[in-house]
Image (tube, grey):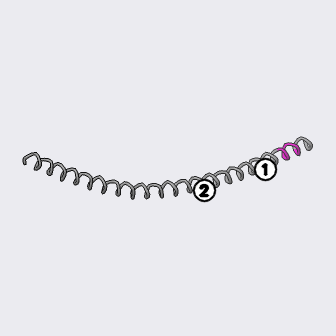
Amino acid sequence: MEALDILEKKIGQLLVKIKNLNEEVQILREENIHLQDKVDQLSSNLVNGQKELSSEKEKAKMFVEGLIQSIDSLVETEQYDG
């Protein structure tokens, strides 16, 4: 009879452990969903930032090219006048 009592106690402990693990799994699933939402948001922000950076880079390139053309024009004018 003592063996059955020990078995009953062990089964009870096992059931508690299973319940705790199921609760932990549920918490981790919810956390995973939350983290996936954050990853999606950060990915979107990254894509938008890359697009904005590319646009700013293109504007800067055009500005520098304009400056170079202006400087070239000034140098050519100086050469003709000089």
Q: Residues within 10 Å of mark 2 (few under 14, many from 20)?
A: few
Q: Is residue 75 magenta?
A: yes
View extreme (front): residue: 1
Q: Which kind of residue does numbered mark 1 sit on? A: Gly
Q: Which residues are magenta?
A: 72-77
Q: Is residue 38 magenta?
A: no
Name the kind of residue labelled 2 in the image. Answer: Asn
Residue found 84% across the figure and 43% down from its top? 75
Q: Earlier in the sequence, mark 1 or mark 2?
A: 2
Which one is nearer the viewer's eye here, 11 or 42? Answer: 11
Task: Name the mark on residue 39.
Answer: none
What secondary structure is found at the residue carrying circle 2? Answer: helix
- According to the picture, the residue beneath numbered tag 2 turns out to be 48
User: Which residue in the structure is indicated by mark 1?
Assistant: 66
Looking at the image, which residue is at 31% across and 55% down?
22
The answer to whether residue 66 is left or right of residue 44 is right
Task: Give 12 or 35, whichever is nearer the viewer.
Answer: 12
What is the total number of numbered labels drawn onto the structure image?
A: 2
For the C terminus, the quadrant is top right
